[in-house]
Amino acid sequence: MASPGSFSRLRTKLMFIYLLILTILCICEAQKLNQTSIVFFLQDIASTAPNATVVPVIGIKGKDWSFNSFGTIFAVDDPITETPNRSSNEVGRAQGILVTSALDGSNVSVLLSIVFTNKEYGGSTLELHGVSRQNERFKEVSVVSGTGSFRFARGFAVFETIYYERSISYSIVRCTIRLLES
């Protein structure tokens, strides 16, 4: 008859083998995932003009409400277009909030819903969340979820400002989204 100690060691070895096999199966399954890329352009007007698409809604009393001022919260409703051209086909809206979340103003927390209105993805959304490091050329945030065609979405989005007109605070931001799907 086996001793209780040898049974415990055998059980530990079997558990280890089970976890090893499970890990190998998960890795194999992950390698079967396809990567999809979507590129579009946010038409961003950050001002107090009537046609602004990014506006500060609250901030710290006595401080300037800006992207460099800690505590400032912005509402966003940017048109999304197929190409950088402002008059190109609109495929959706980037709607959500931005919060200047670093004391020195270097980071902005991003909570955006990409709401598609085009024929291909109309009614579907992608949910983006993360920290946008303002001083970096490429700003990366997570794709944490989605609806419609993008249920269970996961991946990341990279924002790059490709055009900026200071006089009217108008930016064109290229958004490249990479998604994993089975």
Image (cartoon, rainbow, N blue to C red):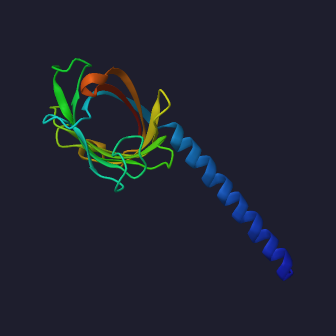
**Residue 12 spot, x, y in % from top left:** 76, 68
Task: Please tell me how many numbered marks the rendered image carries.
Answer: 0
Determine which quarter of the picture holds residue 14: bottom right
In the rendered image, the residue lying farthest to the top is 85
Can residue 94 be seen at all in this image of the molecule? no
| Residue at (17% x, 34% y) in the render | 49
Judged left or right of residue 153, residue 102 is: right
156 vs 152: above or below: above
The x, y position of residue 35, in whole percent, is 43, 32
Residue 95, image quadrant: top left
Residue 150 visible from this viewpoint: yes
The answer to which of 146 and 1 lies nearer the viewer is 146
Q: Residue at x 51, y 45 (%)?
A: 104
The residue at the point 40 percent across, 53 percent down is 71
| Residue 93 position by quadrant | top left
Q: Nearer the viewer, residue 34 or 4?
A: 34
Q: Quadrant of the C terminus?
A: top left
Residue 7 on image: x %, y %:
80, 76
> Between 119 and 129, which is closer to the camera in this rendering?
129
In the picture shown, does residue 52 fall above or below 5? Answer: above
Query: Going 58% across and 48% down the picture, which residue do you hit?
Result: 25
Image quadrant holding the N terminus, namely bottom right
* Nearer the observer, 23 or 146: 146
Residue 61 x/y as whole percent? 34, 56
